[in-house]
Image (tube, grey):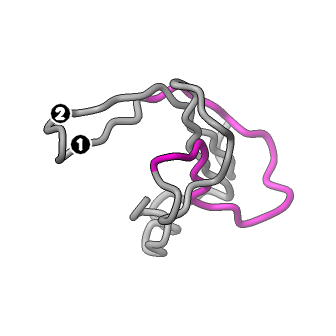
């Protein structure tokens, strides 16, 4: 969540579109905000254009540390990205 508002990463990735989607466990589909995290499914990190071309997708592990229960929790997700030089 914290990376979403850090503009320094806009130039780091050089992409027009990047979104992370939680696909398992299945929950109600909605964009993540500070108010509803972690009860959400998508986090759009950048969306610079309405016409960004073909999106490439890959499966990823979404892991976080639960300080209350003291364990690392991992869920299944996808990362979607588009930009010049990505195919």
Q: Check disc 1 and report the residue beneath it.
A: 66
Residue 59 forms part of the magenta stretch? yes
28 left or right, relative to 52:
left
Where residue 37 appears, as percent x and y from the top left, is 47, 54
- Decide which of tag 2 and tag 1 comes sooner along the chain: 1
Q: Residue at x 13, y 38 (%)?
A: 70
Q: What element carries label 1?
A: strand
Is residue 11 on the magenta stretch? no
Q: Are marks 2 and 1 in contact (CB under 8 Å)?
A: yes
Q: Tell me which residue sits at (45%, 66%) in the image.
A: 9
**Left or right for 23, reference 82:** left
Q: Give the number of marks.
A: 2
Dividing the picture into quadrants, the one containing residue 15 is bottom right
Question: Neighbour class for label 1 at 10 Å: few (<14), some, many (≥20)?
Answer: few
84 or 28, which lies in front? 28
Helix or strand or loop: what does disc 2 sit on? strand
Seen in the image, is 17 located left or right of residue 72? right
The magenta segment is 38-60
Which residue is depicted at the point 43% across and 59% down? 1
Residue 56, x across and y down, in percent:
67, 34
Q: List the residue tagged with mark 2.
A: 71
């Amino acid at each position: 969540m914290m990376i979403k508002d850090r503009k320094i990463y806009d130039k780091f990735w050089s992409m027009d579109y990047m979104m992370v989607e939680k696909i398992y466990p299945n929950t109600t589909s909605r964009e993540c905000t500070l108010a509803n995290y972690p009860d959400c499914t998508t986090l759009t990190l950048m969306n610079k254009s309405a016409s960004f071309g073909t999106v490439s997708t890959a499966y990823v592990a979404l892991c976080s540390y639960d300080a209350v229960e003291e364990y690392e929790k991992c869920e299944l997700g996808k990362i979607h990205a588009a930009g010049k030089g990505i195919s």
